[in-house]
Amino acid sequence: MRITGYRTLTTVQDWGRPVGDANGVFADGVVRVPIVVVETDVGLTGVGLGPHVEIESVFAALDGEDPRGVTALYDRMLRQVFKAGHAGAVFGTIGALDTALWDIKAQAAGEPLWRLLGGRDRRVPAYASGLDIGLGDDELVAAYETYAARGLRAAKIKGGLDVERDRDRLILVRDVLTAAGRGARPGLMLDVNEALTRKQAVRHVGELERTLDLIWVEEPVRRWDAEGHAAVSRGVRASVASGENLTGLEQYRPLLAAGAVDVVQAGAGWGVTHFLRVAALAHAHDLPVSPIGNTPIGLLHAATSVPNHLVSELQELRPPSGVAIDLRIEDGAFVLGDTPGLGLRVDEEAITASRSRLAAPTADGPHIRPERAGQRLLAVGPGAAVPPDHLNPLPS
């Protein structure tokens, strides 16, 4: 079997409501979802969700190779781009291709990927994560009632801009999950998406912990700040979770060496091989690992095979337009199916039809870091979910 080519597609995820975090919001809730399809000479194709930036250069490492040698091909892709570096979206391209190769390998073996990787239990524990900073109270409650109806009893809200608002929102979500669980204590997490300084993070979480018990605070400071994460971890009761935006094991090493992270995360877009290596590194430090991202199908399969998987992020309950997945959500868990490979299929006609809804790239939204992120001295006023950059500037 040989790799003969690839195709790239772009579809949309329509949340039907605003989605975002402390850095910004997509008001229409329509998010672009890039897809890579890898082709072989025997008719098998593999699908990976993720970027296709610099894909011609990266694919040169795969062309004509046997896709079943996936872990060696992963390293070959890293070597292909080592001069310019594999960070950012290029790492996502490697991850998308890697996931597609695992899909092919499992299809060729006639097994779902979770079984091929050595998983025993097809159930993957989940927590709800609504990308919810742009929602009003009623919308927030309605969103988490939907998650609770699927059995989820842990949730992560987006925050970090207004401690009073974060407290109110966490209490609303806590009450929804408590009612659904008939009084059972729910799990609560806060994700601030690198919006705070070290001192701000300790003060912010410390204030919340006067009335709430948080499982973790996520990305309290910049992703690479090992000393800062360690300072936050020492200053609050909650665990510190981070890692979704780290691209390569070399970026994890300083944080783990500093004892800066209590829950090691890996982004869904970075691929299966990356996750397996991150999980092994975390396990060597006696730390749990947790996949992050929407439609993290490859990492869910891989999570069944690692000993230190804690819980996986569940964002939107529906897949992107034109994408079907052999997967269901029940009793607070992802339940993987028996379809060989990832169990992921794309309808290219439906994806083509969705192109009219692809918005042009914008200069705002959660993918753009605000100019004053980490520099605001005061919380924003009530009702301002995501402040413009001119609010609360540093004094001149």
Image: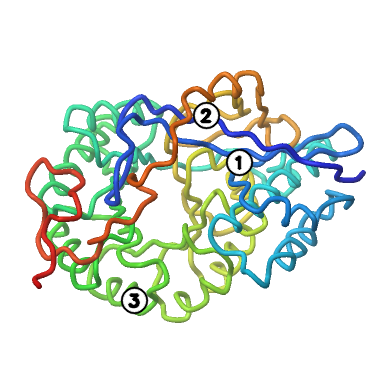
Q: Which residue is mark 1?
A: 49
Q: Which residue is mark 2?
A: 320
Nearer to us in this view, 365 or 74? 365
Amino acid residing under circle 3: Ala
Q: Earlier in the sequence, mark 2 or mark 3?
A: 3
x and y percentages locating residue 154 in the rendered image = 34, 43
Q: Quadrant of residue 241?
A: bottom left
Q: Categorize mark 3 by other alpha carbons within 10 Å: few (<14), some (14-19), many (20+).
A: some
Q: Is residue 317 left or right of residue 90?
A: left
Q: Which residue is mark 3?
A: 230
> Looking at the image, is mark 3 or mark 1 nearer the viewer?
1
Question: With respect to residue 3, does 281 lie above or below?
Answer: below
x and y percentages locating residue 159 in the rendered image = 24, 50
Question: With respect to residue 229, does 335 lie above or below?
Answer: above
Amino acid residing under circle 1: Leu
Q: How far separated are the C-alphas under marks 3 and 1? A: 33 Å
x and y percentages locating residue 193 in the rendered image = 33, 56
Q: Is residue 149 left or right of residue 93?
A: left
Q: How far separated are the C-alphas under marks 1 and 2? A: 10 Å
